[in-house]
Image (cartoon, rainbow, N blue to C red):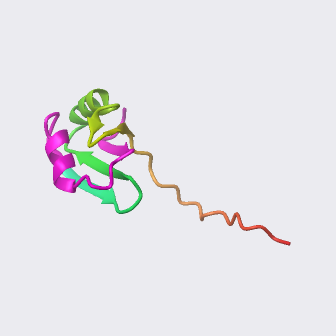
Amino acid sequence: MQGSKLYVGNLNYAVSSQELTDLFSNYGQVDSVNIIEGKGFGFVEMTNQTGAENAKDKLDGYMLKGRALKVNEAKPMSNSPRKNFSRRY
């Protein structure tokens, strides 16, 4: 793993930023938490890579509010424009 930013998926919509901060802080210092409203996923940025790796290893599959979390290293955003997938007739 190269970074300290984690993707956290399969979130229950009722999970708060504070709950994720509390959960992930068991594995290292949390710099920021960003939950994408209404999408069921978010991002947790940790102070160092070791803490992020620890959290990923321990929390991937962890049950939180009835849902198994999916925790992976966050991928960098691409600079390419979104493709238009609309049909043309």
Q: Which residues are magenta?
A: 1-30
> Residue 3 at x, y = what percent?
33, 40
* Residue sticking out furthest to the bottom: 89
Asked if the stretch drawn in magenta spans residue 31, the answer is no
Quarter of the image where the C terminus is located = bottom right
> Residue 86 at x, y = what percent?
72, 67
Q: Residue at x 16, y 53 (%)?
A: 18
* Residue sticking out furthest to the front: 66
Q: Residue at x 52, y 55 (%)?
A: 78
Q: Is residue 88 left or right of residue 3?
A: right
Quarter of the image where the N terminus is located = top left
Q: Residue at x 66, y 63 (%)?
A: 83
Q: Is residue 76 above or below residue 49?
A: below
Asked if the stretch drawn in magenta spans residue 15, the answer is yes
> Residue 29 at x, y = what percent?
14, 42
Q: Is residue 76 left or right of residue 56?
A: right
Q: Is residue 87 left or right of residue 78?
A: right
Q: Is residue 40 left or right of residue 88?
A: left
